Image (spheres, grey):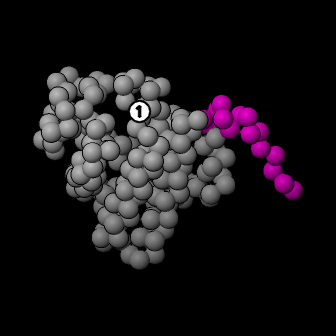
């Protein structure tokens, strides 16, 4: 029998949306266990993953320009212009801390209603709907960022000492999660 999906509710209810996506792509408790079991292998490399991400973000004016405005919650002075957006600027360090916490959340949190809200806020915070109203990261750049993060996660998992079967299943689990995250970003760009 064909499932009936309340499409209006998908747009209004983040938990319903998450449940639909997870069910449809097959993201379930076994995937969560694999993601969480990767913590001993990914956790020590989070700093490297964050640095790789920011090296790429700061390599293009289109992505680096979003770090010039004052970041919500950052106590330090914002860069004056793109020439001051460097890896060692305090505001970049502030943003790196956020990405570090994101990776820790992916591998360490329970995948419950609070996690669904967190994934949704990750999308919302990059638009004018939350945080700093002067910051609006275009969707194409968010897609590029999530693709980069997905690739970095995959590369790090492949380099881990996990056996081939566990590595493959872990990569698949993270890929499903990143597609869910991508949807929770895209939904705020209507």
Residue at the bottom extreme? 164
Q: Residue at x 14, y 36 (%)?
A: 84
What residue appears at the point 46 percent right and 71 percent down from the top-left corner?
A: 168
Q: Position of residue 165 (x, y in %)?
A: 46, 75
Rendered residue at 30%/68% (across/down): 160
Does the magenta segment cover residue 5? yes
The residue depicted at 32 percent of the width and 44 percent of the height is 62
Q: Quadrant of the C terminus?
A: top right
Viewer-side residue, 133 vs 116? 133
Whole-percent x and y of residue 2? Answer: 84, 54
Which one is nearer the viewer's eye here, 49 or 130?
130
Q: Is residue 111 at least partly visible in the picture?
A: no
Examine the rendered structure and indicate whether residue 49 appears above or below residue 112.
Answer: below
- Considering only vertical position in the picture, is 121 above or below 27? above
Residue 40: quadrant of the picture: bottom left
Q: Is residue 153 above or below residue 13?
A: below
Q: Is residue 184 left or right of residue 170?
A: right
Residue hosting label 1: 136
Left or right of residue 128: residue 96? left
The boundaries of the magenta stretch are 1-16
* Residue 23, percent from left and from top: 66, 52
Q: Is residue 144 visible?
A: yes
Q: Check the picture and name the quadrant holding the N terminus.
A: bottom right
Residue 72 in which image quadrant: top left
Say few, some or many: other residues with alpha carbon within 10 Å of mark 1 (under 14 / 14 to 19 / 20 or more): some
In the rendered image, residue 181, in percent from the top left (x then y), is placed at 50, 47
């Amino acid at each position: 029998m064909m499932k009936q999906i309340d499409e209006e509710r998908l747009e209004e209810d983040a938990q319903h949306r998450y449940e639909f996506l997870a069910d449809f792509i097959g993201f379930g408790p076994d995937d969560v266990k694999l993601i969480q079991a990767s913590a001993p292998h990914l956790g020590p490399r989070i700093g490297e993953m964050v640095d790789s991400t920011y090296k790429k973000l700061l390599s293009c004016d289109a992505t680096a320009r979003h770090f010039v405005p004052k970041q919500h919650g950052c106590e330090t002075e914002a860069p004056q212009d793109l020439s001051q957006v460097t890896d060692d600027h305090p505001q970049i360090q502030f943003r790196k801390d956020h990405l570090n916490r994101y990776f820790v959340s992916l591998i360490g949190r329970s995948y419950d209603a609070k996690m669904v809200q967190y994934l949704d806020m990750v999308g919302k915070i990059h638009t004018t709907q939350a945080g700093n109203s002067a910051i609006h990261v275009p969707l194409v750049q968010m897609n590029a960022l999530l693709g980069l993060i997905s690739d970095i996660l995959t590369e790090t998992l492949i380099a881990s000492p996990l056996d081939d079967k566990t590595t493959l299943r872990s990569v698949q689990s993270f890929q499903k999660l990143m597609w869910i995250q991508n949807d929770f970003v895209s939904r705020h760009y209507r």
